[in-house]
Image (cartoon, rainbow, N blue to C red):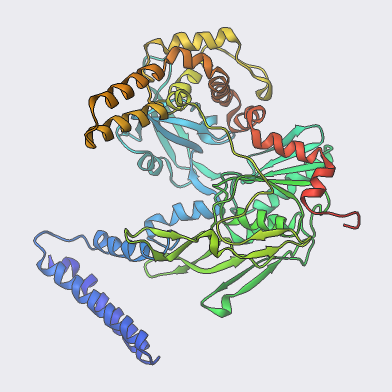
Amino acid sequence: MWRKYKRWVLAIPVLTTAIILFSYTNPGERYFEIAKNLDIFATMFKEVNAYYVDEVNPNTFMRAGIDAMLSSLDPYTNYIPEDDIEDYRFMTTNQYGGIGAVIGRYNNVNRVIMPYEGFPAYEGGLRIGDELIQVDGFDVVDKNTSEISKLLKGQANTEVTIQIKRYGVKEPIALTLTREKITIDNVPYYGFVSEGVGYIKLSDFTTSAGKEVSKALTKLKEDGATKIILDLRENPGGLLSEAVNVTNIFIPRGKEIVSTKGKVSDWNKTYSGLNNPVDTEIPLVVMTDQRSASASEIVSGTIQDYDRGVLVGKKTFGKGLVQATRPLSYNSQLKVTTARYYIPSGRCIQAINYKERNEDGSVKRIPDSLKVEFKTQNGRVVYDVGGIDPDIPVEPGMLAPITISLMSKGLIFNYATHYYYSHESIGPAADFKLTDEEFAEFITWLEDKDYDYTTRVEKTLDDLIKLSKEEKFNGMVEETIAELKKEIHHNKEKDLQKFQDEIKSALEEDIVSRYYLSKGLIEASFDDDAQLQDAIQVLNDPERYNQLLAKTDND
């Protein structure tokens, strides 16, 4: 057993010694503390390995220690072992070897959620709703989606055999697919949402994001677009360089876009537009929400700072940190936060102070009282920390509990599959609507399905009853609450009618996705998208648009 771990145990003191020697060439107590703690760490590992009652797996043991150590910093500083390099490469390039499909789990069943058009999954016959049973002979019924994903991925030009169950087909179906190099577009959709109003959905900032947005904008202008909406909602960010490239499409060459400042002053840098922009004048709306983060906030914040366009939606996430990857031994890497970024007005929008924590260990949010006022190019007041505030705040409507229940239990999804195999085709994605008769068929289909739920009011009353018992109120209080609960107790049949419009919308979007995949899903959502409608409205009202940007006749 000792021989098995000998190389590991001996390697750590050698590494420690090297760092100690290096440390002592740099005077100071800090370096002594680093050397001392590395020595303690190495000897602790040796003692645990030698005397712990059970065998210690050095990989698992060390990984737990590394992860715990880095978790004390921030969520973005991570250790990436060699086995996970491919996953990290996909995050930065949107490329991987596989079949091109999104897998999800509904009610303990693994299903195909979305195959990408033009890739092996769709071309080879996989469809939304197919249940995954086996991958290359391995039973995956009880596997989680990440385990299945690893089985499906592999080198391009290699084969993978998948066994599925399909709606309406009794016997399992076996499909043999040839993996390819899969590249997921940063711009999954662009088109027109109104007369003259072009729309670009940007979902990521991986390699070539700038080129894709530039291509989309150019094509939309050729087709007659005189106004543009850039949708950054639910975009988690990505490469800093691509944030610069996307911004530069709308901002003149040479203009500062973002600067970074960190501990290593030599790494501090100011990024300006290096390319000729596509259009610096076309009226622009950028749509954001609470999941628009990092690179999305650089783009939206810089557009706001230069008064180049109007921001519509919700306050962004508030991630003002920059990460870089550093090579480690054995082909592993460290993704480490190296700097904060600052947009042209001078503000950093980081929302959380990871260095300071509450008593329970949770991180502290930066209070509004510490916000500092900045000015845009036209003199509008904006603030740092906590994300980018939209110029037109729009709160999306809350879904009713019955709609949430139908979606979370997979009943909307399953009925869309049922509809697909019952209807050979439908009309254009943007125009598809369920008739009242078809909605009635859905209600009939639900009759033997479980979709019970608790409304927020019912839950509050349950909590009141529990509290009244704990506080030992008299029985009359409990009786009153119970009567009130009985009075407002939801009726599923009535709720199906009351919230028919939003349930219909959810059904229509899921059904459209079966026929037109992800592009159809986006198009089907336009009519019920309150933020999008507000964006179109402000673009079609030049006077309001200019007022929001504090523009004058000389601008």
Q: Could you say which quadrant of the image residue 223 lies in?
A: top right
Q: Position of residue 377 (x, y in %)?
A: 77, 62
> The N terminus is located in which quarter?
bottom left
In this view of the protein, can residue 495 be seen by the observer?
A: yes
> Is 349 positioned to the left or the right of 490 in the image?
right
Q: Quadrant of residue 509?
A: top right
User: x and y percent of residue 97 in the render?
Assistant: 48, 46
Question: What residue is drawn where x is 33% and y is 66%?
Answer: 69
Above or below residue 521? Residue 182 is: below
What residue is drawn where x is 24% and y is 62%? 61
Q: Nearer the viewer, residue 420 or 196?
A: 196
Q: Position of residue 56 (x, y in %)?
A: 17, 61
Farthest residue toward the right?
554
Between 4 and 20, which is closer to the camera in this rendering? Answer: 20
Residue placed most toward the observer, 13 or 392: 392
Q: Which quarter of the figure has residue 52?
A: bottom left
Q: Look at the picture and state if 204 lies above or below 426.
A: below
Question: Image point 28% across, 21% down: which residue?
Answer: 479
Above or below — where is 33 with respect to 268? below
Instruction: Look at the image and tell me whether residue 141 can be seen.
Output: no
